[in-house]
Image: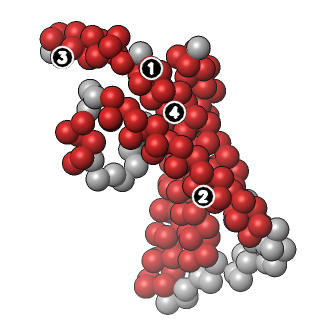
């Protein structure tokens, strides 16, 4: 049942995370162009533009949150893995992963709550752009909610591996023997 839940969540999470990462990549391209325009206007034409710094900052915020589901799903987040590397292939490792995924879900829930509270205060306009600040404040709760599904997928996988430990251990040995 856990494996089926993990697969079902993966069929939802994988395309969403790819799409959001591609959107973040496009935003990186746009931000690069904006910064190059700012450099040209400031140092070549001696006429700095007022909106480029703020727009680059907002794009960076969006890029960060858009990449969260993909980063979490592919275990690309920053981690000190010197302890877990030594425990891979043991039940203790799977238990630590379960604790980590539950902690991530709790952290995401708290972040969503406070992000939504902050979002509700965003009726003011940005300093140099004609957009309301709630447009910027909206992305953290939305993307963290989507990231919760990635954490649930990883949690289901870790629970399955903990419950069916011997079968997973045999698969791991077979994979290592094939290498």
Give the CA separation, mark 4 to mark 1: 12 Å
Q: Residue at x 46, y 43 (%)?
A: 99
What element does badge 4 sit on? helix
**Which residue is the site of mark 3?**
176
**Which residue is the site of mark 4?**
155
The location of residue 50, given as percent across then percent down, is 62, 83
* Quarter where residue 118 is shown: bottom right
* Quarter where residue 151 is shown: top right
Q: Quadrant of the N terminus?
A: top right
- Mark 1: give few (<14), some (14-19) or many (20+) Cα within 10 Å: few
Which of label 3 and label 4 is nearer to you?
A: 4
Ranked by sequence position, the earlier of labels 4 and 1 is: 4
Residue lying at the far bottom of the rendered structure = 46
Give the CA separation, mark 3 to mark 2: 40 Å
Ranked by sequence position, the earlier of labels 2 and 4 is: 2
* Rendered view: 174 above or below 15: above
**Which residue is the site of mark 2?**
62
What element does badge 1 sit on? helix
């Amino acid at each position: 049942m856990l494996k089926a839940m993990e697969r079902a969540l993966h069929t939802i999470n994988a395309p969403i995370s790819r799409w959001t990462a591609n959107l973040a990549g496009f935003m990186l391209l746009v931000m690069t162009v904006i910064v190059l325009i700012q450099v040209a206007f400031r140092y070549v034409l001696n006429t700095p533009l007022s909106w480029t710094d703020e727009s680059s900052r907002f794009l960076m915020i969006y890029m960060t949150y858009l990449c969260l589901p993909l980063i979490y799903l592919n275990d690309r987040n920053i981690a000190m893995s010197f302890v877990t590397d030594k425990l891979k292939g043991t039940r203790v490792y799977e238990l630590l992963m379960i604790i980590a995924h539950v902690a991530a879900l709790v952290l995401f829930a708290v972040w969503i709550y406070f992000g939504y509270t902050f979002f509700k205060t965003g009726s003011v306009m940005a300093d140099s752009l004609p957009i309301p600040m709630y447009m910027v404040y909206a992305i953290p709760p939305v993307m963290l909610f989507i990231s919760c599904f990635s954490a649930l997928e990883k949690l289901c996988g870790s629970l399955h591996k903990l419950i069916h430990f011997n079968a997973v251990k045999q698969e791991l040995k077979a994979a290592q023997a094939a290498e």
